[in-house]
Each structure stands twice: as C-alpha cells, then as structure tokens.
Image (cartoon, rainbow, N blue to C red):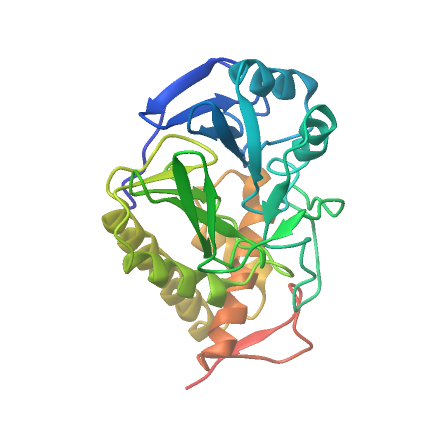
Amino acid sequence: MAIPFHYEEKVDYGAVRWVSPMIRRVVAANPSAFTYHGTGTYIIGSGSVAVVDPGPDLPDHVDAIVAATRGERITHILVTHTHVDHSPATRALKARLEAPSFGYGPHGRGRFESGEEVEEGADRDFAPDVEVRDGDVVRGEGWSVECVHTPGHTSNHICYRLREEGALFSGDHVMGWSTTIVSPPDGDMGDYMRSLERLLAGEDERFWPTHGPSIPDPRAFVRACLAHRRQRFDEISRCLSKGMERVEEMVPVIYRELPRAMHPAAARQVFAALLYLVEEGRAACVDALGVGARYRPVA
C-alpha cells in the first residue's frame, strides 16, 4: 500500500515560523538521508514556553532557538528520544538557561546485537532531569502535553500530545516524508507496530514530526504505515519460501529500486522485520539471532 507522503520544497534554516496558533518551528541545518531537510525544533506557547527536540549540538541552531524566544522564558525542554539529531542541544540550552529537560530516560541497550550503525547515532550522554512515563501530563503556562510512550524506533521514544490543539509531536515515530528506521538493537519492530496501533485510538487532528512537514490526516496515514509494514513482512516471507536465508540475499530483491548506498539501512529494516516474524512464529532463526544469521519459514 502506498503511503501518502507529505513533502516540503525547502526550509529557511535558523528562521522561526509560526505553524499554528500555539506552535513555532526552527529548523537546524543538518540535512541528510535520515533527517530530510534537518531537525525541526518546536516551541510551544508564548511568554513561558516549552522547546520540543532541541536538536543537534550546532551553535547556530542553539542561537536560533534563543533568538526565537527572546523576551520569553523557556520553562521546559521536551525530548522525544536520544539520537544525535534530537537531544544533544539540550546541554547547550541548559548552559544558557535553567529549564529542566524531560524524557523517558537514557538511551536503551536493546535486546539484540548492534551490527552496523546506519542511522543518526545514539546520544548516550543525555539523561533527562525529569523522567516521564506514558500518560504523564506536563503543564506550562497556557499549555499542557500528555506523554505517549511509543517504543519502536528507540525503546525510549516519547510522543507529546498538545491537548489544547489536538496535536501530537510525533518525533521520528511517524514522519510525513519517509518511513521510520527501526534498527536493532534498540529499535524493535514488534514494539513499533504496537505503538502505531496505539496512535490509531487517539483523536489527534495533526502530527508534527521532528523532520519534515506536518501530517494533517494522521489516522489514515498511520493505517497506511501499518499496511506498508505488513506488505514488507509478506515480501520477506516470500523470500524465505524461495530459499533465501540471509538478509543480504533479500535486500536487493525487496529494495531493488533503492540506491545501493542505502542498502545497509535497508538491511537493518529487514533484520528488524525478521526478528518480528520470529517473534510472531512465522519464521525461525537457524543460527544465533543476528543480521548475518540464516532464517527459514515456519509452515
């Protein structure tokens, strides 16, 4: 099933832009194959404000956040998860003001071997001042956000629901421009699928991902994401049924239109999907679980 992606042609790095009555966005100049145009840092409210995903440790970006809130007070720093394009600027911001940081916790260790690092790397130095859990509500002046634990992309991924606008800051869990990388050891496809299902039960009117434009039709978009993943699972099952045992054999078949430079990232996706199929009893691992192991179908 095709996902109805949303794109934006360009961004003005460092400029602050109001995107809704209560939300501003400042985009960092860290474009890549994994970050799209760059990290979109959000500012909630006016006067006393919250910052969502401060972003990478780039002095120009930190300066832009401070400039965007000049004359105001940053009272909360909300972090969706611990990747280097999301959380490191927290330290630089805290060095210039006294706002506490909020997040699920430090970067997780995951359940399986790490393999090749192909995504934006882990920020293992970040630890929130305040650890939040699913259902917690963080309140500021004129705004409140509900914490929604959405493991999958990472085990500590949190979305933040701005209740006054029916808006969800979806981090990297759901992005409008691309599918989400789920890379073991800390990424878990089973958790990711269950987290997507959770969002279907929500009443959010719009998602604000950290990369790319907003998603105005979130439930339809999430349903398409789920269908796309299930289609991938079926493709992998067909590869197994044809005698392909290893991830390296499946990637060129399943991702034949993907540039070869992106095959390492695709391999992590296939590996994550295979672990999910093993968990579901649809596949078996012949060797010790790992990206280089052999897998077979379960009748």
Above or below, 194 against 168 in this view is below
Above or below, 248 against 212 in this view is below
The C terminus, quarter of image? bottom left
Residue 20 appears anywhere in the view: yes
Q: Seen in the image, is 83 located left or right of residue 150?
A: right
Q: Residue furthest bottom?
A: 299
Question: Residue 246 at what x, y percent from top left?
Answer: 58, 66
The residue depicted at 39 percent of the width and 69 percent of the height is: 238
The residue depicted at 63 percent of the width and 50 percent of the height is: 130
Question: Residue 70 at what x, y percent from top left?
Answer: 55, 14
Q: Seen in the image, is 23 located left or right of residue 190?
A: left
Q: Quadrant of residue 63?
A: top right
Q: Seen in the image, is 160 located left or right of residue 264?
A: left
Above or below, 271 against 106 in this view is below
Question: Residue 146 at what x, y percent from top left?
Answer: 42, 51
Q: Quadrant of residue 20?
A: top left
Q: Nearer the viewer, residue 247 or 22?
A: 22
Q: Residue furthest front?
A: 141
Question: Residue 30 at what x, y percent from top left?
Answer: 59, 25
Q: Nearer the viewer, residue 124 or 138?
A: 138
Above or below, 92 against 230 in this view is above
Q: Nearer the viewer, residue 254 or 89?
A: 89
- Total labels drawn: 0
Residue 11 appears anywhere in the view: no
